[in-house]
Image (spheres, helix red, strand yellow):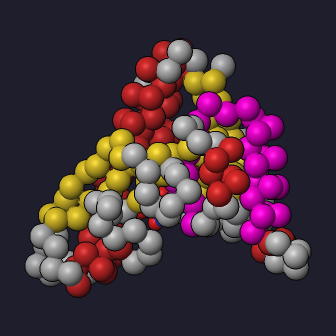
């Protein structure tokens, strides 16, 4: 069986879309793949309950508990790597995981680490992507699934979805429109990768 580990920080709607696609499309039978664990860096992340409702294993590695260490970011990433590696994952899927990862972490999972970002990369890496797209006068916005490399929101693009920016859009209304597309492209990319990998 090939294990997928999903990392979340918040509502987990992308995680849920992936879990539902895995169930609906029978990834277990077709790709010998299953979601082994959903890991959150925030104990109060809404996605944890959604994952549990789907019957998925969940785990919390709370980044705030590393704050007093001499190298908090490295200490957190190392604990996170330990939690992830206990599942020997084929794919590590960042789904609204709002942490900047250390180069050591990224290199460790190189080639099997994916992210979804709510903009048409390389436009608008980082935060507040929807407001920035509106402020820049963009007529289109969207989302990008990409492989993760050591540079933030960089790395080979695997899929993008485009939506219009409407004249009276707020960041929230645009985010909601983009999110519906995220839920389509992320599971699709994962299914494609799993169908190709031996
Ligand atoms: C999604 O829009 C995702 O693209 C974005 O956070 C949201 C998470 O929603 N990710 C980033 O901004 C990563 N830098 P979700 O928790 O409902 O999936």
| Relative to 118, 164 lies left or right | left
Name the spot of residue 116 as percent of width and height, x first. Answer: 44, 54
| Relative to 144, 30 lies left or right | right
Residue 36 visible in the shown view: yes
Examine the structure image and report whether residue 78 is included in the region drawn in magenta.
Answer: yes
- Name the residue: 58% across, 24% down: 33
Above or below, 15 relative to 89: below
Residue 9 visible in the shown view: no
Name the spot of residue 149 as percent of width and height, x first. Answer: 52, 52
What are the residue bounds of the magenta stretch?
73-98
| Relative to 124, 20 lies left or right | right
- Name the residue: 82% across, 77% down: 67
Front residue (pair 153, 21): 153
Above or below, 21 relative to 52: above
- Name the residue: 28% across, 60% down: 120
Examine the structure image and report whether residue 25 is included in the region drawn in magenta.
Answer: no
Which quadrant does the N terminus fall into? top right
- Indicate the quadrant where residue 93 lies: top right
Number of numbered discs on residues:
0
Name the spot of residue 50 as percent of width and height, x first. Answer: 59, 52
- Indicate the quadrant where residue 70 lies: bottom right
Above or below, 8 relative to 172: above
| Relative to 7, 81 lies left or right | right
């Amino acid at each position: 069986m090939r294990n997928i580990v999903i990392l979340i920080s918040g509502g987990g709607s992308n995680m849920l879309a992936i879990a539902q696609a895995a169930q609906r499309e029978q990834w277990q039978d077709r790709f010998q793949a299953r979601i082994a664990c959903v890991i959150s860096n925030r104990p109060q992340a809404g996605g944890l309950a959604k994952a549990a409702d789907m019957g998925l294993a969940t785990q919390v590695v709370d980044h705030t508990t590393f704050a007093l260490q001499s190298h908090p970011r490295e200490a957190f990433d190392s604990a996170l790597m330990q939690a992830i590696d206990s599942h020997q994952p084929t794919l590590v899927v960042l789904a609204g995981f709002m942490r900047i990862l250390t180069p050591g972490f990224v290199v460790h999972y190189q080639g099997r680490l994916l992210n979804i970002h709510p903009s048409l990369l390389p436009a608008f890496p980082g935060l507040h992507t929807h407001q920035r797209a509106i402020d820049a006068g963009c007529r289109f916005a969207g989302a990008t699934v990409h492989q993760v490399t050591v540079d933030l929101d960089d790395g080979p693009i695997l899929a993008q979805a485009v939506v219009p920016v409407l004249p009276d859009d707020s960041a929230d209304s645009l985010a909601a429109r983009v999110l519906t597309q995220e839920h389509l492209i992320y599971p699709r990319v994962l299914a494609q990768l799993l169908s190709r990998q031996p």
